[in-house]
Image (cartoon, rainbow, N blue to C red):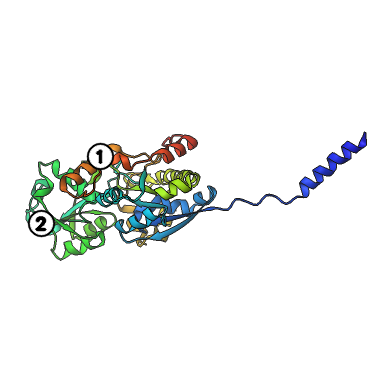
């Protein structure tokens, strides 16, 4: 009668002494970033350990333009990218490059317009510029043809009965906008923070309006997955999105009064000063910042509006007629179901 008991105790001792199963290796995810404030949620997830909590080894690579991300995304060398759904993305899809827009990132929530329309201060002082209707015929800086900024500016022009054809677009990278304003090469610009705040502080430009006033709730940027990543590592994609959503929710706790002034603000500014080129904490504390998207939902209306504008301008060259063919919200939907819908405090 004792043998079964001794045998059970022996088996228990063997089980207790056996080596524990090896921990699952983290899934390496290659992420394309621009080292700008557009990457805020990715950077927060890296710094605060949300990726590692989800078994994700984040491997960021810096690109100086969204267009250069397309080929490595299609090849599967890059798994995830931050950027806007622009004409370059749609043309890449039309050429057979496998990419999907999976979630929203930053947006123009009321009070949080990150894209700022500024006009050369001299034009305001002289009376040449009084209202947005005076933008007609002006040289206005934008980051490139077919970028999200072009559609955003078009929405501003529509509020005063103007169209994109009524202005003289000058395509310059964002870092060059302030210099061009200072030397008189352009009259105005739709630029991003912190450049807009800097230009106003230096007396180079006057602030006219932010994107939340003329294109509210529009998505400023998106998260894009490679189709190779989706096919080969769908579980990693779901865990990535959970970590991203946690970071977005932490960022939401940094927002108040149109900027980084909430309880989590100092922690977010720590991340941004560490990873981006802007190191001046005072600028972060005073500039407008983009709105949070704590449930990572896409604004389908703004996606369609931008796409229609790109088509109208002839910037989409391939055979693609519906932007929703580039969308896959299943990863964000799953993460939201697991984490619960966000309730703002």
Instruction: Give the position of the C terminus as an image quadrant.
Output: top left
Q: Position of residue 210 (x, y in %)?
A: 23, 47
Q: Residues within 10 Å of mark 1 (few under 14, many from 20)?
A: some
Earlier sequence position, callout 1 versus callout 2: 2
Residue 168: image location, x then y, percent: 11, 55
Residue at x 14%, y 41% (from the top left corner)? 158
Q: Residues at badges 1 and 2 in contact (C-beta under 8 Å)? A: no
Judge whether 161 appears above or below 34 on screen.
above
Residue 103: x %, y % from top left: 37, 43
Residue at image point 20% right, 64% down? 179
Q: Secondary structure at mark 1?
A: helix
Q: Residue placed farthest to the right in the image?
A: 1
- For the N terminus, give its image quadrant: top right
* Direction from residue 299 to residue 236 in the image, left or right: right
Label drawn at residue 304: 1
Give the left or right position of residue 55, taking residue 213 as reference. right
Mark 2 lies on residue: 123
The secondary element bearing badge 2 is classed as: helix
From the viewer's perspective, is residue 155 above or below residue 118? above
């Amino acid at each position: 009668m004792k043998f079964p008991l001794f045998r059970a105790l022996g088996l228990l001792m063997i089980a207790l002494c056996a080596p524990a199963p090896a921990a699952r290796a983290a899934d390496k995810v290659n992420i394309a970033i621009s080292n700008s404030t557009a990457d805020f949620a990715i950077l927060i997830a890296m710094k605060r350990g949300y990726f590692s909590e989800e078994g994700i080894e984040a491997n960021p690579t810096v690109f100086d333009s969204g267009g250069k991300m397309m080929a490595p995304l299609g090849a599967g060398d890059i798994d995830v990218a931050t950027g806007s759904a622009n004409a370059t993305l749609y043309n890449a899809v039309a050429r057979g490059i496998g990419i999907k827009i999976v979630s929203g990132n930053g947006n123009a929530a009321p009070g949080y317009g990150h894209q700022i329309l500024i006009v050369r201060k001299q034009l305001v002082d002289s009376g040449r510029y009084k209202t947005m209707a005076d933008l007609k015929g002006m040289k206005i800086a934008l980051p490139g043809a077919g970028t999200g900024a072009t559609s955003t500016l078009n929405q501003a022009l529509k509020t005063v009965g103007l169209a994109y054809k009524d202005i003289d677009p000058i395509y310059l990278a964002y870092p060059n906008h302030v210099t061009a304003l200072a030397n008189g090469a352009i009259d105005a610009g739709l630029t991003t923070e912190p450049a807009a705040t800097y230009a106003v502080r230096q007396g180079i430009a006057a602030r006219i309006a932010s994107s939340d006033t003329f294109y509210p709730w529009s998505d400023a940027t998106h998260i894009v997955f490679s189709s190779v990543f989706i096919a080969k590592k769908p579980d990693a994609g779901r865990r990535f999105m959970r970590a991203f959503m946690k970071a977005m929710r932490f960022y939401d706790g940094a927002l108040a009064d149109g900027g980084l002034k909430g309880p989590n603000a100092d922690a977010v500014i720590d991340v941004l000063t560490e990873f981006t080129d802007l190191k001046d904490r005072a600028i972060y504390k005073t500039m407008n910042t983009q709105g949070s998207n704590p449930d990572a939902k896409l604004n389908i209306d703004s996606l369609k509006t931008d796409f229609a504008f790109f088509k109208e301008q002839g910037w989409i060259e391939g055979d693609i007629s519906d932007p929703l063919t580039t969308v896959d919200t299943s990863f964000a939907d799953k993460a939201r179901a697991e984490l619960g819908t966000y309730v703002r405090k």
